[in-house]
Amino acid sequence: MKKWIVIFVFMIFYCSAESKTLAIGTGVNYSNLTTAVKDALPGDTILFKEGIYQGNQFISNLNGNKNNWITILAEYGRDVIIQGGSVAWMMSNVSFIEIEGFIFEKQTGNGVNIDDGGTFSSPSHDLRIENCIWRDMDATGNSDQLKLSGVDSSLIRRCHFINGSAGGSQIDMVGCHNNFFEDNTFVNAGSNCIQAKGGSSYLTIQRNTFTDGGERSLNIGGSTDLQFFRPQGVTYEASNIYVYSNLFKGSIGTIAFVNAINCEVVNNTIISPGRWTVRILQETVLPQFQKCGNNSFINNLGYIGNAATAEKSINIGPNTAPETFTFSNNLWYNYETPAWKGPNNAVTHINSLVGADPGLKDAMNDNYILLTTSPAIGKGLSVKYPKRDFLNNQFSLPPSIGCYEGKLGVKVDEENYQPDEDTELYPIPANDYMKLNISGKAGETLILSINDLMGNNCNYSRKFSLSEGENSLTIDLSGLNLLKGMYIFSFQKGIRTKYLNFIKN
């Protein structure tokens, strides 16, 4: 008898653990997303049949797990349109969710809104949004096609954003971290294609196409009311935003650094901005905020007309720290006035190419691949990232300038490659000590600090005198009483400060 009870219990558990498909549409069990998610469990698929569905769907606490994601899927090869409403979908406190194949259109507020429900310590996380289309917002104000607030560790890939609201962003982020945006297209934005602000950090934006991106194709930072920052108390709008191998065409300004620190814009191609290629701004002027600085603009190709040269293409606002920026190995060419003398020299330019026709294959027909005779080939600075170009070809060493690698078919030894100023910090996670390997010059001073994620020093600040070549330093953590979690390790050489994250076990 006991044997049969055990078998019966096992069968109940086994059956309940099987994933299921919950169909939405005419003649099936569910008519909309709100009703279907009430029965969804980890591992389940919510499948929309072909059709047009009304917006204003409100979802909260929908959570898969790391081994069993919940998939919200449009019927393959069919148009599944979420139309109208003040919002298409409003999702709060969700995790391990995959969304694929939908068209969102004609919302009057935001298109899709995903947030942490105002519980800043528990973000929505582990989301994948792929192969979706946002188009034709029915709004003119500060309305966003994809609004993310307190969303971490997520991926938005191969999506299309078309005709945003005149006063909004196509993707707007407040307090988001560790997210990837890759292989997307953005067309006809209002204010911005992508905006990352409110304490957003560690975002990678790579291999995207931006066409007519509004006021600023990328707003790296912004201006956020203090109560909305995630986490509270950070001293920047944006930090460690990585913009790699993208293609930009049009917009009034291409890249804006706004109350931003430690961000990298590397190997992008910028075509015909309306007024500025780069803006350096401080829109929140409060004593606790760091000045916009310590950002990098490297290996970028600017193919610009007279409209972007009247103010020398780089706009520098007050209360910023342009002297701490790195502008290196960029190519600047005015196709309307080739004798143009180059961009604003209020920042220091290293190894610029000015006035050299970059040799684009067919710029008149939007083909910006480099000809084999291009002076941009092999003239980039050797950097650790990006490793791949806009077409996912491997960059050579040294790389070409711009988002296209012009010297193809060269094998790179990525495993043994060390850039000019590489650093290695290990072990991670750490216990009582860490090792830092860093290159230096004889007599050069290095200042090391450890801070928590709020920017508070953890009673560790040390000064070292470096030797020529590779230096190996030991960092003793045993007396710091660090709790388990993530910390920021900073190292300063001269006016430059760089940062690495590490985890204490």
Image (cartoon, rainbow, N blue to C red):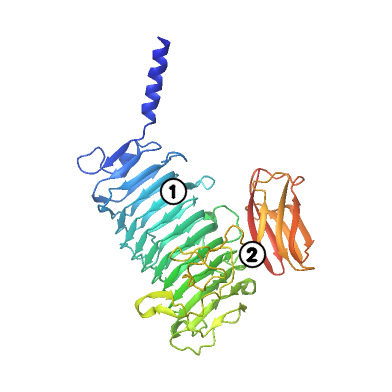
- Residue type, mark 1 in image: Leu
- Residue type, mark 2 in image: Pro
* Residue 445 visible at all: yes
Q: Report the Cα–Cα distance between label 1 and label 2.
A: 36 Å
- The secondary element bearing badge 1 is classed as strand
Instruction: In the rendered view, tell whether residue 434 sits above or below residue 138.
Output: above
Q: Pick the quarter of the image with the N terminus.
A: top left
Q: Which residue is mark 1?
A: 127
Q: Position of residue 433 (x, y in %)?
A: 73, 47
Q: Position of residue 474 (x, y in %)?
A: 76, 53
Q: In the image, which is nearer the foreground, mark 1 or mark 2?
A: 1
The answer to which of 374 and 233 lies nearer the viewer is: 374
Residue 353 lies left or right of residue 20; in this view the side is: right
Which image quadrant for residue 261?
bottom right
Q: Which residue is mark 2?
A: 287
Q: Position of residue 388 (x, y in %)?
A: 49, 63
